[in-house]
Amino acid sequence: MNDAPRPLRRAVLLMWVGATLSALSALVASTLRDDIRAGLEERGRTHPRERLTAIEVDEATSTMVTVLAVSACVAAAIWLVMAWLNRRGRRWSRIAATVLALFALLHTWSLLTRGYPSPVATVLALAVALVGVAAAALLWHPENAEHFARSEVSRTTLNARQDRTTV
């Protein structure tokens, strides 16, 4: 990692921050239970045909909290994998990380325009999106081009050597 350019090192650090924020989001998901329940009950009052029984509200609330927590844990794992792959110079991982950052930004925008239930969750969602965009921007810094090209060449050379030894 020490031979990696400074912008790449910063991008990888931001990816670690993103993983931490995502893991924290998993913990915050459990605090949203009351907000989710209130939203479901409000939906039933404003749309009587969609009203749920008390048991259905409990089940839906538990399901939503679980999905939020698991999704946040998966996001944290993806952040870590992207950091590892980009640090190793995988050219395609830079593209994948950028696409994932854009998805996070769009997801956060959709949450904010629909009204997110908790100020803490809103701040976390914004922070994750901004960290993702910053990391993606750093990945495309011109200083990183040689690192990604050098890593690609060394993998190609290694593969060619292995092919010759297996023949």
Image (tube, rainbow, N blue to C red):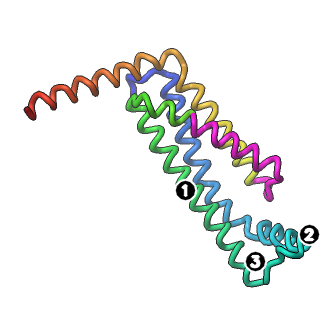
Asked whether residue 82 is drawn in magenta, I would say: no
Q: Which residues are magenta?
A: 99-120
Q: Residue at x 55, y 50 (%)?
A: 75
> Magenta region, mostly helix, strand or loop?
helix
Distance Cα–Cα, label 3 vs label 2? 15 Å
Q: Along the line of sight, which residue is nearer the eye, 9 or 79?
A: 79
Question: In the rendering, at what x and y percent does residue 133 appear?
Answer: 64, 33
The amino acid sitting under disc 2 is Thr
Q: Residue at x 40, y 31 (%)?
A: 90
Question: Which mark is drawn over residue 73?
Answer: 1
- Label 2 residue SS: helix
> Residue 17 sits in which quadrant?
top right
Question: Which mark is drawn over residue 46?
Answer: 2
Q: Nearer the viewer, mark 3 or mark 1?
A: 3
Distance Cα–Cα, label 2 vs label 1? 33 Å
Question: In the rendering, at what x and y percent does residue 71 appear?
Answer: 58, 57
Question: In the rendering, at what x and y percent does residue 97 appear?
Answer: 53, 36
Above or below: residue 105 compared with residue 67: above
Quadrant of the image containing the N terminus: top left
165 on left or right of 27: left
Quadrant of the image containing the C terminus: top left
102 on left or right of 93: right
Residue lying furthest front: 49
Q: Along the line of sight, which residue is nearer the eye, 149 or 31?
A: 149
Q: Nearer the viewer, mark 3 or mark 2?
A: 2
The amino acid sitting under disc 3 is Val
Asked whether residue 118 is drawn in magenta, I would say: yes
First in sequence: mark 3 or mark 2?
2
Q: Residue at x 60, y 26 (%)?
A: 137
First in sequence: mark 2 or mark 1?
2
Distance Cα–Cα, label 3 vs label 1? 24 Å
Report crowding for label 3: few under 14, some 14 to 19, many 20 or more residues within 10 A (C-alpha). Answer: some
